[in-house]
Amino acid sequence: MLPNRRQQILAAIVEQYIETGEPVGSKALLSKLDINVSSATIRNDMAELTRLGLIYQPHTSAGRIPTQSGYRYYVDHLMKVQELGEGDRRRIEAGVDERSGDPEALLTKAGEALVNFTNFAALSTTPSDENAYIKNIEMVPVSPRVAMVVLLTSTGILKSKPCRMDVTLTPDLKASFDELVKEHFNGVPLQDISTVKIQTLAASLGAKALSMSALLATIADLAEMASQADIRLEGKSNLLGYKEYSENLPALLKFLGDEEPLNMLVSSGEGSGPGIEVRIGSENRFSELANSTTIIARYRIGDGATGAIGIIGPTRMNYSKLIPSIQYLSDIVSKVLSEVYEEDTLTNERNEEETD
């Protein structure tokens, strides 16, 4: 650990640079810090912080600015997390529709709230759970030979896909489909819906296999879609205005347009469970994010599904305010989706008791 005075100096440099975006000199520090030492002493301490790689001098005669290691030390040891005021809480809550039981709709609103609150890019993932199961599948005819198949999971994820049939849709066909779903799919874990299962089921249907084959293939596709967490990015254009990205902006925008690395970025910390992660610069593992910080909070639905919500912005950001704000928003998402999940569970249990 750094000696106390050098900790104060580092914290002051980080906080003033975050506020102004300008290198911080010894005279500015002396007026800001409540310590009785000379400018020479401050300069000596700054030289030692530079030697340790926590700050650096961008050019001769300039002040100092934090390095990635300096930000990391500040976040881990020096930062005083700001308590969210009532106004900030209301702004965050106002951006989220707490009445929404649809995870995707709720996360879209939460992402928009983060964009507006932080002026950075916001990302989120739909909840994923290895134990998620099929809650229901509906088939809605939209023309004589086209149906919309809709799959709902136990985590509230809704997936739909049109299915073009080889036969004409009839009320009897729909009734047969509903019975098939009830008997073979409702309550089945998503991970159990395999090609082998679908082929085995089709083979057991005898004369009905021809009319059901396209629908069964669509169910398999929907189960695969529902088992994978979707990632969404809001507010990418916000990053255009930050000078930190002036040199690598094209590469950054291309990176943000690719779902695969974004999924890797978000999923790399999932093992830690609910909580918040701050990754600075190279800690994000992608060269396009060398000048960026990601703050990602994990939310949980009950004791099962988890997802992520967070921001991407320049390393010069107000960590002490943003970290509690993102955590608060994540807590709201967890609370709302958990309440919906618990209500659905109780309803299902009551229905099962009535059926018995």
Image (spheres, rainbow, N blue to C red):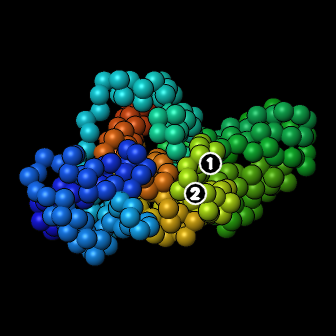
Could you classify mark 1 by the number of other residues whose Cα lies within 10 Å: few (under 14), some (14-19), or many (20 or more)?
some
What is the residue that sits farthest to the bottom in this orientation? 51
Q: Residue 318: horizontal and vertical position, in percent?
A: 37, 45
> Could you say where residue 348 lies in the image, as x and y percent from the top left?
45, 34
Which residue: 76% across, 34% down?
Answer: 140
Q: Which of 305 and 315 is in front in this view?
A: 315
Question: Is residue 336 placed above or below 314 in the rendered structure?
Answer: above
Q: Which amino acid does label 1 sit on?
A: Leu
Q: Where is residue 325 in the image (x, y as percent from the top left)?
A: 36, 39
**Image quarter of the N terminus:** bottom left
Residue 43 position (above or below residue 99):
below
Circle 2/circle 1 CB separation < 8 Å: yes
Q: Residue under label 2, please give it.
A: 245
Q: Residues within 10 Å of mark 2 (few under 14, many from 20)?
A: many
**Labelled disc at residue 74:** none
Q: What element carries label 2?
A: helix
Question: CA separation, marks 2 and 1?
Answer: 7 Å
Q: Mark 1 sits on what residue?
A: 240
